[in-house]
Image (spheres, grey):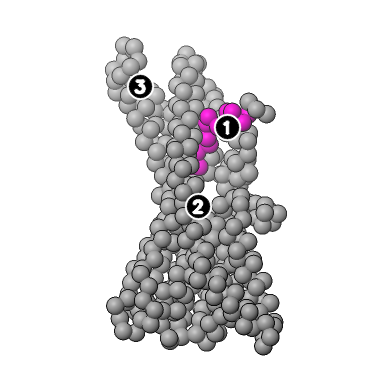
Amino acid sequence: MPIIRQIHSWFAVPDLRNFGTISRLMLTSMLGLLLFPLINNSSESYLRQVYDNAAWAAPTLLLILVKGYALASALPRVTESRFAVPIVHLSNLLVFVAVDYVVLGERMSFWQHFFLFNFFALGFMYTEASRRYSLAPSLSEARLSALTARIRPHFLFNSLNAAISLIRLRPYDAETLLENLANLFRAQLRDGSQNSTLGQEIEWAQEYIAIEQIRMGHTRVQVMWQHHAPDDAETPHLLLQPLLENAVFHGIESTHRPGCISVLTTRQKHWIYIRIENPYVPTDSQENAKPHKGNSMALRNLKERLALMYDNDAVIKSRQLDGIFRVDIRLPYRRKSSDLKQLFG
């Protein structure tokens, strides 16, 4: 087992569902095909060597991309296990042997191709492990800053004061508020996987809104939910709640008027789209009863986590329209494979 852990720390299985990873793999492969003839002591011409190497490397790479995408989508636990590196590398070797030795019948140059394939495949997995290791400090900093951004003292104190004031007059509402508050903070402080599901994110967001509706009134805080995306879609942990807290804090609490927040989730082919809209009153407006400085920390932390989790596949944009602040998020649709025990810790 220690040998497996050591191998797993030196090498990492690239996520072939990610466009950024596929782009890096394709670019590295093309550079390898163009550079290898320059260092190879062969009497053949440069273009002939490029063509001969591409004849076996191109179909091998294509099949490995298809196999890697199918394996990561259908059996994600295999690619995330401690045996992922040897399993994936052996399966890639089988693909290479099937193409080079069986289909193309390269008997004479098989061992040369075998050496080149192993050198490139292991080198790319080593580079992927180094890249993830270099991002580890940024990920830890993003987790810490996201945690401090989510737990706002004013929200905690106001919720507790609201529960105290409701204990005698409306004990059921006080109990509901405290239960939702406990569940929300348990979710925020829990350790473990940084992944969640969209269904769980909707539930945590609704618990937060329920707290604000009890504290500020159901007529003042209104939310229109349009949830049309799959509940099992994988998302970063606590994706929606910080954005809704921003919407309430800057869009509703800063004015004396009721406000409606819109939350829309939908799936289009291989993508999950999320849109959050809330009322927006400029800070310098006379209608702003509690002018707060624009707090973009939640958006900034979310952008960092999305970049670390999905590379270039995830997109988040925010803009101000006529009296509306809108946040649009696009995520690749991936089904969460964890069971309920792993999901709730």
- Where is residue 26? Give x, y as percent: 39, 37
Earlier-in-chain disc, 2 versus 3: 3
Picture quadrant of residue 8: top right
Q: What are the residue bounds of the magenta stretch?
A: 4-16
Q: Specify whether residue 157 is in view.
A: yes
- The CA distance from mark 1 to mark 2 is 24 Å
- The CA distance from mark 2 to mark 3 is 42 Å
Q: Which residue is mark 1?
A: 8
Label 3 neighbour load within 10 Å: few <14, some 14-19, many 20+: some
Circle 1/circle 2 CB separation < 8 Å: no
| Along the viewing direction, whichever of 87 and 80 lies nearer the viewer | 80
- Where is residue 140? Give x, y as percent: 49, 47
Q: Which residue is mark 3?
A: 36
Q: Nearer the viewer, mark 1 or mark 2?
A: 2
Residue pictured at 57% horizontal, 75% vertical: 159
**Amino acid type at mark 2:** Arg
Helix, strand or loop under label 3: helix
Label 2 neighbour load within 10 Å: few <14, some 14-19, many 20+: some
Earlier-in-chain disc, 3 versus 1: 1
Earlier-in-chain disc, 1 versus 2: 1
Horizontal arrangement in the rendering, residue 136 relative to residue 186 (left or right): left
Magenta segment: does it hold 14? yes
Horizontal arrangement in the rendering, residue 16 relative to residue 77 (left or right): left
Quadrant including the C terminus? bottom right
Helix, strand or loop under label 2: helix
For residue 143, the mark is 2
- Where is residue 233? Give x, y as percent: 56, 58
Quadrant including the N terminus? top right
Residue pictured at 39% horizontal, 66% vertical: 295
**Amino acid type at mark 3:** Phe
